[in-house]
Amino acid sequence: MQHKVKNKNIKSCIYEISQICFLLLYPQEALAASKEGMQLWLNVLLPVLLPFLILTGILIHTNMAGKLLQPVEVIWNKVLGVSAAGAYAVIVGALCGYPVGAKITSDLYENHQISESEAKYLLTFTNHASPVFIRTYLCHICLKDQIPARTVFGIFALSDLTIMLLFRFVVYRNKIQFLSADKKKKTPVSSSSGAFLDVSIMNGFETVTRLGGYILMFSILSACISHFWNMKNLIGYTLSGILELTTGLCRLQNANIHMQWKYLLTLFLTAFGGICITFQTRSLVTRKLSMLPYITAKLLNGITTVLFALFFSKII
């Protein structure tokens, strides 16, 4: 165990030293990458995610997340195999995109609104690109509207449904347990709405600040790799997207490759999410929950998305 920790510290030290050297030797490139990452954080993540995180925090701390969907809980149980509180994570994750679904799932588990088995199951299909990202950035900017948005949405929806069914009926078959009402955490009567609001605001700012830090570091890392390695080929574009999704998609849209490859790579990278989003998700999910089911699900999601895309484009 100590040997693994030592190796991890050595790798972390090497990474940090390499980043510092790049900052000192190539300050202009590092500064440009930093600005690009911070603009993404300031113009997109901060105004979009922060309000949702604050409001969601209030709903979870007051136990309202599950109560809002309680009247139709039987539908969530039958269709998705989740509780009413779990359904809230599904809905918010689908609307808000990476990594809100995983964050909500972790918060619900930490606040004793869902069980550990349900939390692990939810992590496999609640963390996706948002509809706004898919429609505006993916379809309009990256694919130049050459592929109808409804086709792209349909492919992602079928892929997500396939992954959900796989984990529900194969991996977690008869293993998903729901918390009974007496085991769920009760909201203290003495707790004021002001206290919940303060906690939710602080947690929201902490979350978006942490995400900004990851975007900044991965933007610099991507610039460092691009400086020393020619990324203007199929492998380079793929690696760039796997490393950081938005940067990779931006480079891929200007790539001089066949539209078919560009289309398939774009869908795979968006479904998978990339290493940066995986690190963001890990930072927001409690250490009590393993990330292995999540990573496995995202890889399978990327593969099934490509297969559905091939099927609908009549290539196979």
Image (tube, helix red, strand yellow):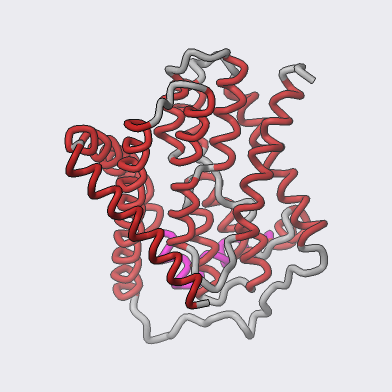
- Image x and y of residue 250, in percent: 41, 26
Q: Is residue 175 above or below residue 188?
A: above
Q: Would you place residue 49 above or below residue 103 in this image?
A: above
Give the residue at x 43% y 61%.
283
On the image, the x and y values in percent for residue 282 come to: 48, 60
Q: How many marks?
A: 0
Residue 316 relative to residue 208: left or right = right
Decide if residue 2 is on the left or right side of residue 69: left
Answer whether residue 185 is magenta in the image: no
In this view of the protein, which residue sits in the foreground, 82 or 128?
128
Question: Which quadrant would residue 36 be assigned to in this image?
Answer: top left
Quarter of the picture containing the C terminus is top right
Query: Taken as a whole, is the magenta stretch helix, strand or loop?
Result: helix
Q: Is residue 132 visible?
A: no
**Res 121 quadrant in image:** bottom right
Q: Position of residue 101 (x, y in %)?
A: 53, 54
Horizontal side, residue 40 vs residue 288: left or right: left
Look at 41% across and 59% down and name the residue there.
Answer: 11
Magenta-span inclusion, residue 68: yes
Residue 276: x percent and y percent?
44, 47
Nearest the camera: 230 or 234?
A: 230
Residue for point 32% across, 48% down: 217
Q: Is residue 284 visible?
A: yes
- Residue at 51%, 23% (x, y): give it: 139
Using the image as rendered, state which of residue 51 and residue 315 is in the foreground.
315
Q: Is residue 261 depicted above or below 297 in this figure?
A: above
**Which residues are the magenta region?**
54-72
